[in-house]
Image (cartoon, grey):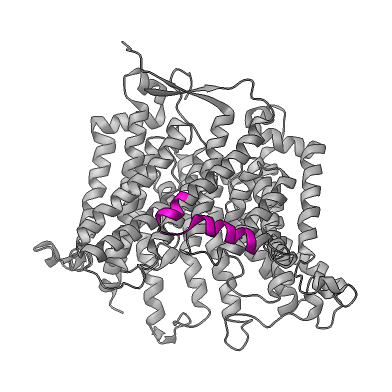
Amino acid sequence: MDLTNVLAAGVASGTVLLFAAIGEIFAERAGVLNLGVEGMMLLGAVAGFATGVATGDPWLGVLVAMLAGGLLSMIHAVMTISLRADQVVSGLALTFLGTGLARVLGEGVSSARNTALIPQVTVPILSDIPIIGDIFFTEQRAVVYIGYLLVPLAWYWINRTRPGLHLRAVGEYPAAADAQGIGVYRLRYLYVFIGGMLAGLAGATITLAISPGWFGDQTVNGRGWIAIGLVIFAQWSPLRAAFGALLFGAILRFIIDIQGVPSILAFANPFLAGRSSTFFLEMLPYLLVILAVVIGSREAARKRIGAPAALGRPFVRGERGT
Amino acid sequence: MTLSLEPRTDAPRWLSPALTVAAFIFALALSAVIIALVGGDPIRSYLHILGAAFGSVGVISDTLVKATPLILTGLACSLAFRMRLWNIGAEGQFLLGAWGASAVVLAPILPAGTPAIVVIPVMMLAGALAGGLWGFIPGILRARLGVSEIIVTLMLNYVALSWIQFWVFGPWSEGGFQQTDAFPREAWLPRLTDFATAVPGLGGLTVHLGLIFGIVCAAIMWVALERTRWGYEIRLIGDSPAAARYAGIDIKKKIVIVFVISGALAGLGGMSEVSGVVHRLQDHISPGYGFTAIIIAYLARFGPFRVVIASILFGALILAGREIQPQGIPAMIQGVILFSLILADVLVRYRIRFERRLATA
């Protein structure tokens, strides 16, 4: 087990969480909690893969996946923004619907295994940096680099631009934003849509790059929920989300890799594939998400920074209050 | 054109139940369209569900068997949701309950040969305790640290599944297979078919005592919620946390207690499933009962007796849905039903008006 290879694979696996978490950050920063990430990712995963298989063009697959995720998220947007339905319930319903739709569309796709995947790219110059170059810039799938670009871009957009200021205003104090002439409803729709597209991209990243193929519900296997947990851990910051995504990507990858090693430091590996103790390994990431969310909540409470103030609340024009 | 919502101040009493039923029918119609679009035959699918779920005494019994775990997990969700606690972890609590009950026989906690009159109550207790413990974790984290119970309960579902798999593949594995040894007869909940020697008509009917657990729990929960001070406080917290705080109710304590009871109900559901149906522990004992329970709680508007009825409907969908192609259809129908119910909620609370947009300054 070569450590740089393991870490490089961890970076790739973290990209999936990264896209989904940053998408959710956009939606939540606008004040809309969308618990449908798992469903949107599944739909994106199957739509992207099916398109890739049908056309042989993985990038077209990525595009279709993003559209599929974005369109699905619009149901949640109509329900919660226009109709003021409860965001928790609507988000759960979105996951049910997305999962069901993905399984229906995925019927028959599963057998078709081989398709062109998103190409691997080695970045010249950067890949020559010792260790870092091997981990981050050598033979990674092209989407991984898109992830690298997305993090600073999302951070800059939210914290340093005028539209980003509007986004934060809509999530923190929509009534004031509305008084300033900012279209609260319009912006919330927009960012929920962006969140959906990024979730779809996360799904396609799984099926067309990181672990190719369609395996029903197992394809996403809770990573949408992990991403939502990471948003709390990250306290709604794209930079911290990137850190969390890399960390959990590495953990998710590590528990796969360690099962293939016969011995660790001369001790027989208790987690060798096929042993029942591997199940403790499999529950590890989920336990760590709980730990991360606890840490995130504690820290947020201590520093008095919390969720966007209007998160979870419908905006009613002309009504006073948050 | 713009859409405006006016809060209703005078919603008639019949409106909510009428819209709930209408939403259910609307969801089935919408699902029919989707089934047709993906190349299925909706009418045949629905007739198939009807026949396969209610067509004879035998299949009605099968439907009730499927409804049993749904009733208990549905009650678990209803209780928590009534207080606006999002327990999305009934699935994991159900699995832990199944594990706890199995431990009584397989660990073993009671020696072999203990009579059923002792084994069954101990299994019930163990199942409820294990499920309650699984509910305690998100409860205490939410109450003490303000941690989102949604994430914690969801994550614990995955942990519970791995935990079950560890025991099923490892210490309790039956010769390397993915299941444990079958329980001895003393650990089986009585089924109707067990009395077929006395009453021949009961032969083959697999309805078991767990159904009674569900109905009794529904009755207890109704009394507790509607006729006691404790229940009044829970409803008050759900309707208006600020008023509850003002009234001096210890909300944090209630959060923990309600989560433990909720987990215990789901855990009892897990016990009833291993003891009444599967008679051993295996990793696929739940096709997502704990998730369907969320929709059931919504369809029932958190009413305990309505949970029983909604569970029977969904029991039918799960039972007959297994043979419907493509396989994702039942899951999709569940999603459509939940969205329709949300829509019905909106219509109960608001009058929707479409207005031509006026020229505003």
Q: Residue at x 51, y 35 (%)?
A: A85
Tell which residue pokes out farthest to the left in this image. Answer: A125
> Which residue is rendered at x = 66% and y = 57% of the image?
B70
The answer to which quarter of the image holds residue A236 is top left
Where's residue A181, x and y in %? 31, 19
Residue B77 in the magenta stretch? The answer is no
Q: Name the one closer to the observer, A110 or B240.
A: A110
Quadrant where the N terminus of chain A lies?
bottom left
Magenta span: predominant SS is helix
Left or right: residue A21 versus residue B341 is left
Residue B91 percent coordinates (x, y): 60, 59
x and y percentages locating residue B262 in the rendered image: 68, 52
The residue at the point 40 percent across, 53 percent down is: B37
In this rendered view, identify the residue nearer to me: B1 or A92.
B1
Q: Nearer the viewer, residue A267 or B198?
A: B198
Write down the region rendered in magenta.
B33-52
**Rendered residue at 67%/50% (across/down):** B310
Is residue A11 something that shows in the picture? no
Q: Residue furthest right?
A: B198
Quarter of the figure with residue B302: top right
